[in-house]
Image (cartoon, rainbow, N blue to C red):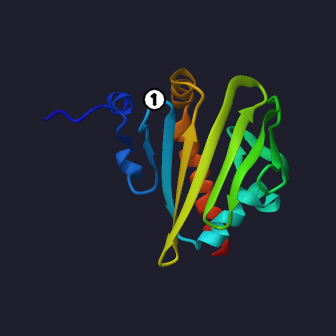
């Protein structure tokens, strides 16, 4: 039986992982419009939830390639808005915003996501946190407006960027857990 390449696995909706990083990040494409990312962290779920939702904590670990999170405004309630702006020396600002659809601390968070310089439509992002023996598994399902938008995001470096972002989150959590 032939082992599928990463590209073949993605088109078949299977899990893709780099062998070197196998236990830390799983990316799946269960439907034509979804990407599911799963990563476990050695920290209690309440701490992970806070790191995802408190501006002063997000600024410590959340980055975009070559940029840091400079503006982080959050109204954490259903119907509340958020806005992030990433800035880097010699680079243009990158902004994103959306609205929280569901906030069930510390277990679940659902929000819309729109990028200010890319008219791809709204993305619905749902994060579920499950804790077992002090270890928290974060599962984020992003539902894109179309297969084309999802595929564009996958091709733009989603896996590498998600891996870097989650590694930064893991470093932050290790420093405070």
What residue is drawn where x is 39% and y is 44%? 17
Residue farthest left in this picture? 1
What residue is drawn where x is 65% and y is 55%? 109
Looking at the picture, does residue 143 appear above or below residue 40?
Answer: above
Q: Position of residue 97 (x, y in %)?
A: 78, 39
Looking at the picture, does residue 26 appear above or below residue 158?
Answer: below
The answer to whether 97 appears left or right of 169 in the picture is right
For label 1, the residue is 32
Q: 153 or 68, which is in the foreground?
A: 153
The answer to whether 164 appears left or right of 91 in the picture is left
Q: Position of residue 25 (x, y in %)?
A: 46, 51
Give SS at disc 1: loop
Q: Position of residue 42 (x, y in %)?
A: 53, 70
The answer to whether 68 appears left or right of 126 in the picture is right
Residue farthest bottom in this picture? 133
Quadrant of the drawing holding the C terminus: bottom right
What residue is drawn where x is 82% and y is 50%? 80
Q: How many marks?
A: 1
Q: Residues within 10 Å of mark 1 (few under 14, many from 20)?
A: some
What residue is drawn where x is 82% and y is 46%? 81
Q: 46 or 110, which is in the foreground?
A: 110
**Which image quadrant for residue 114?**
top right
Quadrant of the drawing holding the N terminus: top left
Q: Position of residue 10 (x, y in %)?
A: 39, 32
């Amino acid at each position: 039986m032939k082992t599928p390449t990463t590209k073949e696995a993605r088109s078949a909706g299977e899990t893709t992982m780099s062998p070197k990083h196998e236990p830390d990040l799983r990316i799946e494409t269960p439907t034509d419009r979804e990407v599911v990312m799963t990563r476990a962290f050695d920290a209690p779920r309440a701490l992970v939830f806070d790191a995802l939702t408190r501006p002063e904590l997000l600024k410590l670990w959340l980055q975009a390639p070559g940029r840091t999170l400079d503006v982080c405004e959050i109204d954490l309630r259903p119907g509340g808005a958020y806005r992030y702006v990433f800035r880097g020396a010699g680079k243009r600002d990158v902004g994103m915003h959306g609205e929280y659809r569901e906030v069930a601390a510390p277990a679940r968070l659902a929000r819309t996501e729109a990028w200010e310089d890319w008219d791809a439509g709204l993305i619905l992002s749902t994060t579920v946190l499950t804790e077992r023996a002090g270890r928290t598994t974060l599962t984020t399902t992003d539902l894109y407006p179309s297969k084309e938008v999802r595929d564009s995001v996958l091709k733009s470096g989603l896996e590498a960027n998600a891996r870097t972002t989650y590694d930064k989150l893991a470093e932050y959590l290790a420093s405070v857990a």
